[in-house]
Each structure stands twice: as C-alpha cells, then as structure tokens.
C-alpha cells in the first residue's frame, strides 16, 4: 500500500505540478524503486519488486512524456529519465519505446526517444530481456504479451525505418541490428548454461521463438553467421552446450523450423559441427526430417556443394540416422533417373541432384552397397539412357560422368563404364565428389610456414653460367665470326611424302593408301584442289563425297573433322545438284550412324550458306591505288583530274559511294534440291533410325536445317512452295516433348514468315494462319522453355506485320472479297 501511494503521488506531481523542483524530487523517488544497489536503504527488495510488477508500465508512459518537454536539461534527462527505461524490466521498456516511436510525430521529443532506444540496445538490455524469459520456467505468462514482445523484438528495424525514414540511425539498420540480436541471444544462452550448472531450472522457448521468427523473416544469414561459429566451438567439448542447442531447436515452432535449418546448414562449415548443434532432430521432428532429407536435397537447388556435404555427412555420421541416408539415396536416384525430370527440370537442378547422388553413394558402406546394388544398377541404366537421349550437351555429359562414377563404385564383375567427354570444371567437380574429404572440420591454423621447405638450392643452375668452360678455343686462331650468316629462315624440312597436286591422286590416296602421312597431306589439300579444279571436281564429285562421308579418323589427324567437312562443302558448292542429291538420299539410308547423319545436315547447311553469299569482288579499288605512280602511264591524267575537281565549285554533289556490285544468287536455282528430298521419308522408321521416335536429336537438327534453307531462299521463285511444305511438316511435331525440337519448329515458322512473300501467305496459307497464330500465342504464354517463348513472340510479330502489310494492299482486299 505504501509503494502504491508513493508512486501515485510522484506521478501526480509530474503530471500536474508547476514546480520543477518538486518534479525532480518525484523523479528521484521513482528512480529509487529501480536502484538495486545493496547499500541503498531508500527502498526494500519487496518494494522494488512490487513497483516493477504493478507500477512500472505507468511510470514508462510518464517517462515518454518527459522526453518531450523542454524545461529539463540534457543532463537531468540523462540522470533521471533515461534510467527509467534502462534499469527496469526490459520487456516492458522495449514495448513502451516501440509504441512511442510508432505514435510520435517527427519532433525533438522523437529524437530523444530514439537516442534512449539506442542506449537500450547498446547497454545489453536485449540480453537481459532474453535471459529474463529463460528464468520464467514454469511460471504462468501472457501469450498475448509474449506475441507482442516477439513482434517488436524481431521487427525493430522495420518499425524504426517506417517511422524515421531517411533519418534512421545506423544501429537500427538490419545489417547492424540482427548481428547484435544474435550476440544477445548467445549471451542469454551462456547465462542459461551457467544457471543450469548452478542447479537453476531454465527455459529457452522464447529464445527459440525469436530465432525462428528472425530466420523466417529472411534474416537467417546475418544472425546465424554470428551464432553458428560460436555454437560450433562451444559444443565441441561441452555436453551441456549440446543439450542446450538441441533444446533450442526443439522449441522452434514448426512453421519457422525450415528457415532455421536451411540457414544453419549454410552457416556451419562441417557435418560434425552441424551434428553437434542439431543432434537427432531429424528423427524426432517430421518437419526437420522432411527439410533435411527432401527439400534441401531435391527442391531447393541453389545451395553450394558444401551444404550437400554437411547434410549428407550429418545423416551418415550416426547409426540411428543412417536409415535416413538410405531413404535419401532411393529418392535422389529416382529423381536423377526420371526421364520426365531430365526433360523438364532446369540444368542447375539436374546438376544439384547429380551431386547429391554421387555424395550419397560415396558415403555408403560396403554392406549397404551390396544391399542396394540392384537399385543402383537400375538407376544407372535408366538414368544414363535418359541423359544420353537429351539434346543438351551438359545433360549428356552429366549422365556420362555420373554413370562412370556409379559403375566404378559398384564394380560389377570388374567392368566399368567409360565415356568420351570434354573435361571442364563441372565434370572435375562431379568426379571429385566420389573422393571423401579427409579434413572435415577446419581447425585453427598453427601458423607453420611451409614456404622454406619448398625452396631448393639453385647452385646447380648457377654453376653452369659462373664456371667458364675449359675447352674455349684460342682467340688467336682463325675465326669466321665476321662472315654474314646465310638466311635459312624460309627453309622447309624435306619429307619423304609430298601433298598431291592432282585431284584424282588425292582421291586415290584417300581411298586406298595406308600411309598416315600421305592421307593427312591429301586431306589437308583436298578443299583447295576441289576449288581450283572445277571441271575435274565435277567428274568425281559424288565418288569423292562418298569416300569422305565414310572416312574414319584412323590416324588421329589433328583437325580431322574440320578438314573432312571443308572438303565436302567445297564439293557441294562446286557440283551442287549431284552432290546434294547423293547426300539427301543417304540421309535416310540404312546403316548410318547418327553422327554421319548430322554431318550430312551440317555439310548441306554450310554449302547452302556459301551458295547464297555473293562472290567476293576481286578487283577492289584499293588495288589500283597501291601501284607505283611512275609505272602507271595514265598517272598524269589522275593528277590533272584531281586539280580540276579541286578548282571546280559545285552547288550539289551526288553520292560518291559506289553501290554493291550485283551478283547472281547461286542458291536460288538449286534450293529445291537441298530442301524437298529431306521431307521425303521422315515418317518411315528404319532399322537403325527412327526420326519421330528416339532420335529426336537428329529431328531437331533436321528442322533447324530446313528452316535455314527456307531463310536462305528469300526472294527465290520456289520460296512459296517451300514455305507451305515446311509449315505442313513442322505442324505434326509442334508439341514435341524435347525443347530442341520445339525450338527448331519455331525457328522454321519464323523463317517461313520472314522469307515467304506476304501475298502468298493469304493465298497459299490462308486457312492455316489463324490456327497457327493461336498456337503461337499459347506457346508464347505457356511453354516452359525461355527460348521457345521468345521465338513464338518473334513469329507472332512477323506474322502480324506480314498480314498488316498485305491487308493494306488494295489488291489483297479485292482478293479477299
């Protein structure tokens, strides 16, 4: 009763009295209830406890009002008003400060309140707040109060930023506040451990809720970057710290647990540290098990490889958790071998799943490997086939590397898969995952310097230069040093074989010679011989094309594929009709590999491009100006002409730019020979070739090549017929599952709209245009591939422009009517 009367009298004086001295005395009375000094006899412990419990909230509201008055000096506010917020119960003080910051308008009072809030944070009051919540173990509390306090505590940067805007303090910024909050949580946990050693019961439920809410709000990075290293060190040799960490994570609400685990698995540096902090949470909490065994490994694929090492190493480090590792292996292997996932998931996710699979297999014991051999074998067979069927090079390479690693780990009858692929950083990383890392948790550096050990004496290298030779010739003898040396820089080493000079000799060597040197020399000069001897090339063009198409790199010639392709392109350009007829006929023939069929398409595409390019102008104007003036009999005429032009005044002068010299298009007359034979037998599956079935890689390249032929045939008389045929062909495969085929279809449609005369679109394709436009709109909106959507948008623009241009023509309007 006495405390209540004294507090009521002091508050009445502060609110109604006009005497500043009385107000100062009232403030001193209120501060005496917050003075915990042992030698202070003004108030007793029971009185101070009653004041904190029943009267502190009203005192804080009065303190907020006193921060806005001007009759007090800065020193008086610092000594009498600020301690009201810094010495009482921290939870009530924080709520009062945040409420006042939200309600006050910009003023000097708001600035003083913000300064008090800064002092509150810098004086360790957050640690006191969290520690007080840990001490209230088993005591009844208010859920509404805890919820309000948690909201203010975790959203303090947002509250201050919304109110202060550009005047916000640096301490309230997220990059400063959340690391501070993490340090205060560590301090509260440290006090908890000490209290447990002293026999005091504690609870970390509120700290766990604070950690969970901060992480789910997206601040797990800065918070756990402070907490995780400290927890890893404390739990290394202290079992009590391990129990506190396990209890902390167990008390995180399930709706926030994912944010804590995903942030923690990125912050720790080793599976051992993660296991000490988390314990067997994956066995006791279904949400944690789902996050660690499914979400982090299969769905969230943006993490680094170290995260996979940490999670899988954690599951494999304890006998009770190893069944979860087996469960992970089955789910990851099914995801990796799923053909639908290979076709429709992003490349980054496929790479991430491949890493998870290899790391899981590397952590299996031999006994576990024997039990799972059949599952792994089926995964390897199905997965490698699914990856090799893809048209994306990176996907195929991933399948090859993972297949090699799995077969090497299983060691089935001593046979191992071997593929040929290009070694790059990605493949080297995948191969390294099969080797378990020896150094698990980083230890402090002992500072040893190994630089001196790697240094070798260099005396052996310097003695050669320092010691003169004993066999130096006598300087008095005759010497030929004064003679000018003969220039031998242009000399060439004479070999036993020389390149052929005639085309038939070159063909004979390629057909029957077993001499690797002569074959290489003949292949290197084949292109130049074909282009220099046009008449001879036309006589043997088909025969030589056949030889080159079936030629194999038996002697490992450097640049073999490029040399062979260049020679075949030269033959197709020199004698277009026979060579093109042969190549297009052989494309659908039996007993050809997919590589040879792709070579045929590449040769035809390169030949068509070269034929559509005009001849280079051999008589350039610069060559006439490089001759020496004295050797030119007409030089004086040029000098006179220049002088006349310099003295002549012209009102207007025409363009001096010489237009490009017109040249015939060599591709237009033979475009049909390139295009139509490739549409002949596409729907007839052969013994070794199924274009509309499993060989979709060749189908995609074929459609791209046909689209290129269509694009090069612009302004050709046969363009309208080619466009109608191409549109009919691609219409049947427009919904193909492979993204490369769909890209080829859209590229071909673009080529049709770009190269086909606009007046022919309405005449020849009038019935199909609107259906085509509807299909393109659907692709532009819903296709999973970005390139397909972009090509569909481009095709729509081309189609709309062509239709708009044609409908504006009066002749087209009369035709439509």
Image: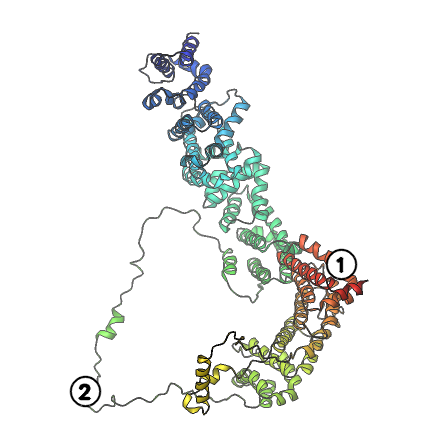
Q: Residue at x 50, y 62 (%)?
A: 424
| Total numbered labels | 2
| Residue displayed at 69% across by 55% down | 779
Q: Which residue is mark 2?
A: 475
Give above or below for 762 relative to 615: above
Query: For mark 2, does the 10 Å Cα neighbourhood hold few (<14), some (14 to 19), or many (20 or more) residues?
Result: few
The image quadrant where one finds the C terminus is bottom right
Tell me if 500 is positioned left or right of 38 in this view. right
Mark toward the viewer: 1 or 2? 1
Residue 557 vs 152, above or below: the answer is below
From the viewer's perspective, tell me whether residue 595 is left or right of residue 426.
Answer: right
Residue under label 1, please give it.
Answer: 770
Does residue 48 sit above or below 665 in this rendering? above
For residue 715, which quarter of the picture?
A: bottom right
Question: x, y percentage for residue 288?
Answer: 56, 39
Q: Percent position (x, y) of residue 321?
A: 55, 42
Of callouts 1 and 2, which one flags the residue occurring earlier in the amino acid sequence? 2
Report helix, strand or loop for mark 1. Answer: helix
């Amino acid at each position: 009763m006495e405390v209540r009367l004294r507090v009521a009298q002091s508050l009445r004086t502060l609110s109604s009295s006009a005497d500043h001295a009385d107000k100062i005395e009232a403030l001193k009375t209120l501060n005496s209830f917050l003075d915990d000094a042992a030698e202070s006899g003004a108030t007793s412990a029971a009185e101070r406890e009653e004041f904190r419990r029943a009267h502190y909230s009203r005192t804080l509201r009065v303190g907020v009002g006193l921060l806005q008055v001007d009759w007090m000096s800065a020193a008086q506010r610092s000594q009498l008003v600020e301690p009201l917020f810094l010495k009482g119960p921290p939870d009530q003080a924080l709520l009062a400060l945040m409420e006042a910051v939200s309600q006050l308008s910009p003023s000097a009072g708001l600035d003083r309140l913000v300064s008090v809030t800064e002092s509150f944070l810098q004086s360790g009051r957050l640690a006191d707040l969290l520690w007080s919540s840990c001490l209230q173990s088993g005591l009844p509390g208010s859920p509404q109060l805890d919820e309000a306090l948690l909201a203010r505590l975790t959203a303090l940067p947002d509250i201050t930023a919304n109110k202060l805007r550009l005047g916000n303090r640096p301490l309230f910024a997220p990059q400063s506040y959340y690391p501070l909050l993490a340090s205060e949580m560590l301090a509260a946990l440290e006090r908890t451990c000490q209290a447990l050693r002293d026999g005091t019961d504690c609870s970390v439920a509120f700290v766990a809720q604070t950690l969970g809410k901060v992480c789910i709000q997206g601040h797990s990075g800065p918070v756990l970057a402070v907490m995780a290293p400290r927890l890893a060190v404390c739990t290394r040799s202290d079992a009590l710290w391990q129990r506190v960490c396990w209890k902390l994570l167990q008390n995180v609400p399930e709706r926030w647990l994912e944010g804590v685990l995903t942030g923690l698995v990125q912050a720790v540096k080793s599976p051992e540290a993660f296991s000490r902090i988390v314990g067997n949470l994956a066995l006791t909490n279904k949400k944690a098990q789902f996050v660690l065994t499914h979400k982090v490994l299969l769905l969230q694929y943006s993490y680094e490889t170290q995260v996979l090492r940490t999670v899988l190493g954690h599951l494999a480090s304890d006998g009770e958790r190893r069944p979860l590792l087996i469960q992970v292996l089955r789910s990851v292997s099914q995801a990796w071998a799923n053909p639908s996932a290979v076709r429709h998931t992003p490349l980054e996710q496929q790479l991430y799943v491949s890493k998870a699979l290899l790391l899981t297999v590397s952590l299996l014991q031999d006994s576990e490997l024997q039990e799972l051999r059949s599952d792994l074998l089926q995964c390897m067979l199905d997965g490698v086939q699914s990856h090799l069927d893809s048209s994306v090079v990176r996907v195929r390479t991933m399948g090859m590397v993972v297949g090699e690693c799995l077969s090497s780990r299983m060691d089935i009858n001593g046979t191992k898969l071997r593929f040929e692929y290009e070694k790059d950083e990605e493949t080297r990383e995948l191969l390294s995952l099969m080797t378990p890392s020896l150094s698990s948790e980083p230890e402090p550096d002992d500072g040893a310097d190994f630089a001196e050990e790697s240094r070798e004496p260099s005396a052996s290298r310097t003695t050669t230069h320092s010691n003169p030779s004993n066999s130096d010739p006598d300087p008095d003898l005759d010497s030929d040093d004064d003679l000018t040396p003969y220039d031998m820089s242009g000399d060439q080493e004479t070999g036993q074989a020389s390149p052929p000079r005639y085309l038939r000799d070159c063909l004979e060597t390629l057909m029957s010679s077993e001499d690797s040197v002569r074959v290489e020399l003949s292949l290197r000069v084949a292109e130049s011989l074909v282009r220099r001897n046009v008449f001879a090339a036309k006589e043997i063009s088909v025969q030589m094309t056949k030889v080159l198409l079936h030629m194999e790199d038996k002697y490992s010639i450097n640049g073999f594929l490029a040399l062979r392709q260049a020679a075949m392109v030269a033959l197709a350009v020199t004698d277009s009709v026979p060579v093109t007829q042969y190549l297009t006929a052989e494309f659908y023939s039996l007993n050809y590999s997919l590589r040879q069929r792709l070579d045929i398409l590449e040769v035809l595409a390169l030949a068509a491009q070269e034929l559509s390019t005009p001849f280079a102008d051999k008589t350039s104007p610069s060559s006439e100006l490089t001759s020496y003036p004295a050797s030119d009999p007409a030089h004086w005429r040029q000098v006179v002409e220049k002088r006349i032009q310099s003295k002549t005044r012209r009102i207007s002068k025409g363009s001096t730019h010489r237009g490009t010299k017109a040249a015939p298009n060599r591709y237009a007359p033979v475009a049909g020979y390139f295009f139509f034979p490739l549409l002949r037998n596409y729907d007839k599956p052969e013994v070794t070739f199924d274009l509309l079935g499993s060989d979709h890689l060749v189908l995609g390249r074929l459609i791209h090549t046909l689209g290129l032929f269509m694009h090069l045939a612009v302004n050709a008389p046969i363009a309208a017929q080619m466009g109608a045929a191409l549109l009919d062909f691609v219409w049947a495969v427009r919904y193909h599952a492979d993204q490369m085929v769909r890209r080829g279809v859209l590229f071909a449609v673009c080529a049709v709209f770009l190269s086909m005369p606009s007046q022919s679109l309405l005449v020849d394709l009038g019935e199909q245009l609107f259906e085509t436009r509807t299909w393109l709109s659907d692709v532009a909106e819903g296709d999973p591939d970005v390139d397909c959507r972009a090509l569909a948008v481009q095709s729509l623009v081309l189609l709309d422009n062509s239709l708009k241009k044609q409908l504006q023509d009066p002749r087209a309007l009369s035709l439509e009517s």
